[in-house]
Amino acid sequence: METLEQQVAKEINEKDTVIHIGGEELKVKPLTLGQIIDISAEIAELKGISEEDQGKDVLTVMLDHLDDLEVQLNIALIVLYRNEEDRIENKKFIRNNLDEKAMTELQELYVERLNSPFFFDQYNFPSRFESDEEDKNDSPWAIIFGAMKGLGLSYHEVLHEISWLNIQMLLKCQPSYSTDKDKPKQVHASQIF
Protein backbone atom coordinates (compact mmCIF):
# COMPACT_ATOMS: atom_id res chain seq x y z
CA MET A 1 0.00 0.00 0.00
CA GLU A 2 1.39 3.38 -1.01
CA THR A 3 1.88 6.08 1.59
CA LEU A 4 0.26 9.48 1.18
CA GLU A 5 3.63 10.95 0.23
CA GLN A 6 4.16 8.29 -2.44
CA GLN A 7 0.71 8.90 -3.90
CA VAL A 8 1.27 12.67 -3.97
CA ALA A 9 4.68 12.24 -5.62
CA LYS A 10 3.19 9.88 -8.21
CA GLU A 11 0.46 12.36 -9.14
CA ILE A 12 2.53 15.55 -9.11
CA ASN A 13 5.22 13.92 -11.22
CA GLU A 14 2.59 12.22 -13.38
CA LYS A 15 4.32 8.86 -13.03
CA ASP A 16 3.44 6.23 -15.59
CA THR A 17 1.68 3.03 -14.60
CA VAL A 18 2.87 -0.02 -16.52
CA ILE A 19 0.23 -2.29 -18.07
CA HIS A 20 1.13 -5.43 -20.03
CA ILE A 21 -0.91 -6.08 -23.17
CA GLY A 22 0.01 -8.64 -25.80
CA GLY A 23 3.51 -9.06 -24.43
CA GLU A 24 4.13 -5.32 -24.68
CA GLU A 25 4.82 -3.06 -21.72
CA LEU A 26 2.62 0.03 -22.08
CA LYS A 27 3.24 3.11 -19.94
CA VAL A 28 -0.03 4.79 -19.00
CA LYS A 29 -0.02 8.40 -17.85
CA PRO A 30 -2.61 9.91 -15.48
CA LEU A 31 -5.82 11.00 -17.19
CA THR A 32 -6.11 14.50 -18.60
CA LEU A 33 -9.33 16.51 -18.71
CA GLY A 34 -9.50 15.79 -22.44
CA GLN A 35 -9.37 12.05 -21.78
CA ILE A 36 -12.08 12.31 -19.11
CA ILE A 37 -14.34 14.20 -21.54
CA ASP A 38 -13.67 11.59 -24.25
CA ILE A 39 -14.47 8.75 -21.81
CA SER A 40 -17.75 10.48 -20.87
CA ALA A 41 -18.72 10.68 -24.52
CA GLU A 42 -18.02 6.97 -24.96
CA ILE A 43 -19.91 5.98 -21.81
CA ALA A 44 -22.96 7.82 -23.15
CA GLU A 45 -22.94 5.36 -26.08
CA LEU A 46 -23.26 2.26 -23.88
CA LYS A 47 -26.62 0.56 -24.26
CA GLY A 48 -26.62 -1.17 -20.92
CA ILE A 49 -28.72 -4.18 -20.00
CA SER A 50 -32.41 -3.36 -19.92
CA GLU A 51 -35.59 -5.14 -18.83
CA GLU A 52 -36.15 -6.03 -22.48
CA ASP A 53 -33.02 -8.18 -22.32
CA GLN A 54 -34.36 -10.30 -19.48
CA GLY A 55 -35.76 -13.58 -20.62
CA LYS A 56 -33.58 -13.62 -23.75
CA ASP A 57 -30.91 -16.25 -24.12
CA VAL A 58 -27.34 -15.18 -23.40
CA LEU A 59 -26.21 -15.36 -27.03
CA THR A 60 -29.00 -13.04 -28.20
CA VAL A 61 -28.19 -10.50 -25.49
CA MET A 62 -24.49 -10.66 -26.36
CA LEU A 63 -25.23 -10.07 -30.03
CA ASP A 64 -27.53 -7.17 -29.16
CA HIS A 65 -24.70 -5.56 -27.19
CA LEU A 66 -21.74 -6.03 -29.54
CA ASP A 67 -21.55 -2.25 -29.92
CA ASP A 68 -20.80 -2.03 -26.19
CA LEU A 69 -17.60 -4.01 -26.79
CA GLU A 70 -16.46 -1.38 -29.29
CA VAL A 71 -17.21 1.36 -26.73
CA GLN A 72 -15.18 -0.51 -24.11
CA LEU A 73 -12.31 -0.81 -26.58
CA ASN A 74 -12.49 2.93 -27.25
CA ILE A 75 -12.44 3.66 -23.50
CA ALA A 76 -9.38 1.44 -23.11
CA LEU A 77 -7.64 3.31 -25.95
CA ILE A 78 -8.49 6.66 -24.34
CA VAL A 79 -7.05 5.55 -21.00
CA LEU A 80 -3.91 4.16 -22.66
CA TYR A 81 -3.17 7.08 -24.98
CA ARG A 82 -3.56 10.82 -24.45
CA ASN A 83 -3.06 11.54 -28.14
CA GLU A 84 -5.82 10.75 -30.66
CA GLU A 85 -3.27 9.75 -33.32
CA ASP A 86 -1.74 7.18 -30.93
CA ARG A 87 -5.20 5.74 -30.30
CA ILE A 88 -5.83 5.30 -34.00
CA GLU A 89 -2.35 3.89 -34.65
CA ASN A 90 -2.62 1.31 -31.86
CA LYS A 91 -6.29 0.35 -32.12
CA LYS A 92 -5.70 -2.86 -34.06
CA PHE A 93 -2.98 -4.04 -31.65
CA ILE A 94 -5.15 -3.30 -28.59
CA ARG A 95 -8.23 -4.91 -30.19
CA ASN A 96 -6.25 -8.09 -30.89
CA ASN A 97 -4.45 -8.28 -27.54
CA LEU A 98 -6.59 -6.69 -24.82
CA ASP A 99 -7.65 -9.49 -22.52
CA GLU A 100 -9.89 -9.51 -19.45
CA LYS A 101 -6.96 -9.14 -17.03
CA ALA A 102 -5.55 -6.07 -18.80
CA MET A 103 -9.02 -4.53 -19.15
CA THR A 104 -9.60 -4.97 -15.42
CA GLU A 105 -6.21 -3.35 -14.69
CA LEU A 106 -7.14 -0.39 -16.91
CA GLN A 107 -10.53 0.04 -15.24
CA GLU A 108 -8.94 -0.07 -11.78
CA LEU A 109 -6.29 2.38 -12.93
CA TYR A 110 -8.66 5.04 -14.15
CA VAL A 111 -10.95 4.67 -11.14
CA GLU A 112 -7.92 5.05 -8.84
CA ARG A 113 -6.58 8.01 -10.78
CA LEU A 114 -9.94 9.80 -10.61
CA ASN A 115 -9.94 9.57 -6.82
CA SER A 116 -9.36 13.28 -6.21
CA PRO A 117 -11.48 13.30 -3.02
CA PHE A 118 -8.68 11.26 -1.44
CA PHE A 119 -6.29 14.16 -1.94
CA PHE A 120 -8.81 16.81 -0.92
CA ASP A 121 -9.44 14.90 2.32
CA GLN A 122 -5.72 14.87 3.13
CA TYR A 123 -4.96 18.57 2.80
CA ASN A 124 -6.43 21.84 3.98
CA PHE A 125 -7.15 24.17 1.13
CA PRO A 126 -7.95 27.84 1.68
CA SER A 127 -11.62 28.64 1.41
CA ARG A 128 -12.86 30.57 -1.58
CA PHE A 129 -15.06 33.61 -1.33
CA GLU A 130 -18.53 32.60 -2.39
CA SER A 131 -20.16 34.56 -5.17
CA ASP A 132 -23.65 35.96 -4.72
CA GLU A 133 -24.42 35.04 -8.31
CA GLU A 134 -27.01 32.32 -8.68
CA ASP A 135 -25.78 31.19 -12.08
CA LYS A 136 -22.53 29.35 -11.55
CA ASN A 137 -21.10 28.05 -14.79
CA ASP A 138 -19.62 24.58 -14.36
CA SER A 139 -19.66 23.65 -18.03
CA PRO A 140 -16.54 22.02 -19.49
CA TRP A 141 -15.74 25.29 -21.26
CA ALA A 142 -15.83 27.23 -17.98
CA ILE A 143 -13.54 24.68 -16.36
CA ILE A 144 -11.11 24.78 -19.29
CA PHE A 145 -11.17 28.59 -19.35
CA GLY A 146 -10.67 28.79 -15.59
CA ALA A 147 -7.62 26.54 -15.77
CA MET A 148 -6.20 28.46 -18.75
CA LYS A 149 -6.70 31.81 -17.07
CA GLY A 150 -5.87 30.80 -13.53
CA LEU A 151 -2.80 28.74 -14.34
CA GLY A 152 -1.61 30.47 -17.49
CA LEU A 153 -1.87 27.29 -19.53
CA SER A 154 -2.78 26.80 -23.16
CA TYR A 155 -5.94 25.01 -24.25
CA HIS A 156 -3.85 22.04 -25.38
CA GLU A 157 -1.95 21.86 -22.07
CA VAL A 158 -5.19 21.82 -20.06
CA LEU A 159 -6.83 19.16 -22.19
CA HIS A 160 -3.96 16.92 -23.20
CA GLU A 161 -0.73 17.44 -21.29
CA ILE A 162 -1.44 17.81 -17.56
CA SER A 163 -3.43 15.30 -15.56
CA TRP A 164 -6.84 16.44 -14.42
CA LEU A 165 -5.93 15.75 -10.81
CA ASN A 166 -2.90 18.06 -10.99
CA ILE A 167 -5.02 20.80 -12.58
CA GLN A 168 -7.59 20.46 -9.78
CA MET A 169 -4.91 20.59 -7.10
CA LEU A 170 -3.26 23.66 -8.67
CA LEU A 171 -6.59 25.47 -8.99
CA LYS A 172 -7.41 24.73 -5.35
CA CYS A 173 -4.13 26.33 -4.28
CA GLN A 174 -4.64 29.60 -6.15
CA PRO A 175 -4.66 32.65 -3.91
CA SER A 176 -8.02 34.34 -3.49
CA TYR A 177 -8.68 37.96 -2.78
CA SER A 178 -11.35 39.53 -0.66
CA THR A 179 -13.59 42.28 -2.01
CA ASP A 180 -14.78 45.40 -0.20
CA LYS A 181 -17.90 43.58 0.96
CA ASP A 182 -15.79 40.95 2.75
CA LYS A 183 -14.76 42.48 6.02
CA PRO A 184 -11.67 41.12 7.70
CA LYS A 185 -12.13 39.61 11.13
CA GLN A 186 -11.03 41.72 14.08
CA VAL A 187 -8.03 40.09 15.66
CA HIS A 188 -6.77 41.26 19.05
CA ALA A 189 -2.99 41.57 19.40
CA SER A 190 -3.01 39.11 22.28
CA GLN A 191 -4.33 36.45 19.91
CA ILE A 192 -1.29 36.84 17.68
CA PHE A 193 1.38 36.48 20.38
Image (cartoon, rainbow, N blue to C red):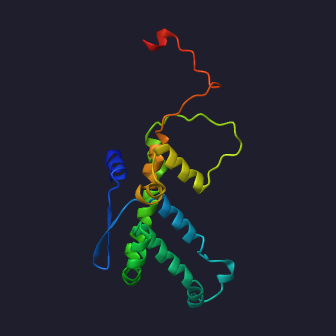
Any part of residue 119 in sight: yes
Classify residue 5 as left or right of residue 191. left
Residue at the spot x=44%, y=62% of the render?
A: 110
* Residue located farthest toward the top when viewing the structure as drawn: 190
Q: Is residue 10 above or below residue 95?
A: above
Residue at the spot x=47%, y=55% of the render?
A: 158
Residue nearer the viewer, 33 or 63: 33
> On the image, which quarter does residue 102 sit in?
bottom left
Residue 20 on image: x %, y %? 31, 73
Q: Is residue 26 above or below residue 165?
A: below
Residue at the spot x=35%, y=46% of the render?
A: 4
Residue nearer the viewer, 54 or 140: 140
Q: Is residue 86 above or below residue 10?
A: below
Residue 77 on image: x %, y %? 43, 73
Q: Is residue 170 above or below residue 19?
A: above
Classify residue 47 as left or right of residue 117. right
Classify residue 50 as left or right of residue 94. right
Classify residue 171 as left or right of residue 97. right
Where's the C terminus, which quadrant?
Answer: top left
Residue at the spot x=31%, y=80% of the render?
A: 22
Residue 141 on image: x %, y %? 58, 55
* Residue located farthest toward the right when viewing the structure as drawn: 134
Number of marks drawn: 0
> On the image, which quarter does residue 88 sit in?
bottom left
Any part of residue 99 in sight: no
> On the image, which quarter does residue 100 sit in?
bottom left
Residue 11 on image: x %, y %? 37, 52
Residue nearer the viewer, 34 or 66: 34
